[in-house]
Each structure stands twice: as structure tokens, then as C-alpha cells.
Image (tube, helix red, strand yellow):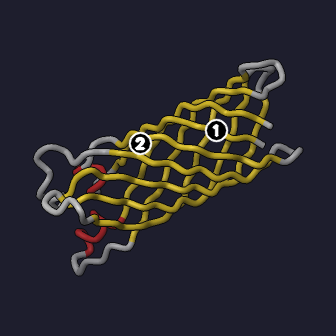
Amino acid sequence: SNADAKIILLKPVGNNHLSKDYSTFFGFGFGGNLMTPINFGIGLDYNVLFSNVKYGNENMAGSIGSPVLTIADLFISHRDKLSEDFEVEEMIGFSFYSHTNLFNYQKNQKYKNTGNGLNLGGRIIYNLDMEGYQQVFLAGKINFYYTNVFNENKEIQKYYDRSVFLSLGLGYRYNF
């Protein structure tokens, strides 16, 4: 079992509003993983990421600013020991999203949207001590984001309703 903290860079990709209208998201996260003796585990991550509306896209984004994306991941993992110093971990799971923005002209009001989707990822882990209690890791993940935006025009709905996220994380883990 372990607990970790990480910094994250998340890039929305594709033809959608998160990719076209927002800058890359940066943030931090915390998580934990309960491992079994056969190197399978179940884990939970909680991440908070911040971005900006791209300059010139304020009208496309709906006069909103200060985007915050909160992600809770529930996943199953498997760990393989590569050597005394290195391990690799594969993950598959489900993500819950909360996307919040402040309105530019009404700072006390927020726009909030929720979504969910599948996530796939992996970590390369380096042991900092001989016992393997302290580790650093580089994580990569792909998230699929689906939300509940509805529009009569299916192209507009697709533009605002879904996205794909690619993320990189660098973190510290403590095993207990």
C-alpha cells in the first residue's frame, strides 16, 4: 500500500472546446493504492488542475475565465518489478470530473459542469532507498471525458460534450 503526491501537466487534444479554447492545465494531486501480495491493487487519485482561456477565445468560451478541472480517479493497478531500482505500474479505471469557471462579469457566480469517463495509464517508478519505502515516479495517462451538454446541432454538442486528455505527472510515493 502507498500514498503519493504529484505535480501534473494535462493537455486536452482533439476538436473540442477544452482543446481549442483553453491553455494547457497545470496542477497537483494526491492519491493512494492498496496493493495485494500478487501485485494487483485498487487506487484512488484526486487532482486539481488550473488553466486560462486562450487570448482571443473569450467569446467562444462564453465570457468565462479561471477554468479549474477537478478529477477523481478510481482504478485497478498492476505492478511489475523490472530491477532492484525500477518498477512499472499499469492502471485502468474510471474518472469523475468537475469543470468550474468563474464568469468574467459576475465574479461571485460560477459555471459548473460534471462528467465522467475511462482512464488508462502507467507509471515508471524509481526506488530511492534499499527497502523500497520511498519512490519517485513519472506517470502518463489518457483520460476520456464525456459530459452532459445537449444541443440540437450534433456538431456543436460534440464540440462541447467530450474531450480526450493526455497527462504527465511527476511525483513522490511512500510505501507502507
Say which of 93 and 35 sits in front.
35
In the rendered image, the vertical position of residue 46 relative to residue 116, given as above or below: above
Residue 83 is situated, as x and y percent measured from the top left of the image, at 79, 22
Residue shown at the point (22%, 76%) measured from the top left: 153
At horizontal 44% and vertical 44% (from top left) the residue drawn is: 166
Question: At 36% from the left edge and 43% from the top edge, which residue is drawn?
Answer: 25
Which quarter of the figure has residue 51? top left
Dot 1 falls on a residue whose secondary structure is strand
Spatial CA distance of label 1 from label 2 is 18 Å
Whole-percent x and y of residue 66? 27, 50
Q: Is residue 31 left or right of residue 99?
A: right
Classify the position of the N terminus by image quarter: top right
Image quarter where the C terminus lies is top right
Q: How dense is the environment of label 2, judged by Cα within 10 Å: few (below 14), some, or many (20 and up)?
A: many
SS at mark 2? strand
Residue on which the image places disc 2: 10
Q: Answer few, some or many: residues within 10 Å of disc 1's Cα (few below 14, many 20 plus, some between 14 and 19).
A: some
Q: Position of residue 160 (x, y in %)?
A: 29, 65
Q: In terms of sequence position, does the residue under pointer 1 or pointer 2 come before the other?
A: 1
Image coordinates of residue 110 in percent, x first then y, are 28, 64
Disc 2 marks which amino acid?
A: Leu
Q: Which residue appears at 22% of the width and 53% of the height?
A: 65
Out of 120 and 149, give the one closest to the viewer: 149
* Image: 37 above or below 100: above
Can you tell which mark lies on residue 4? 1
Query: Furthest-bottom residue in view?
Result: 152
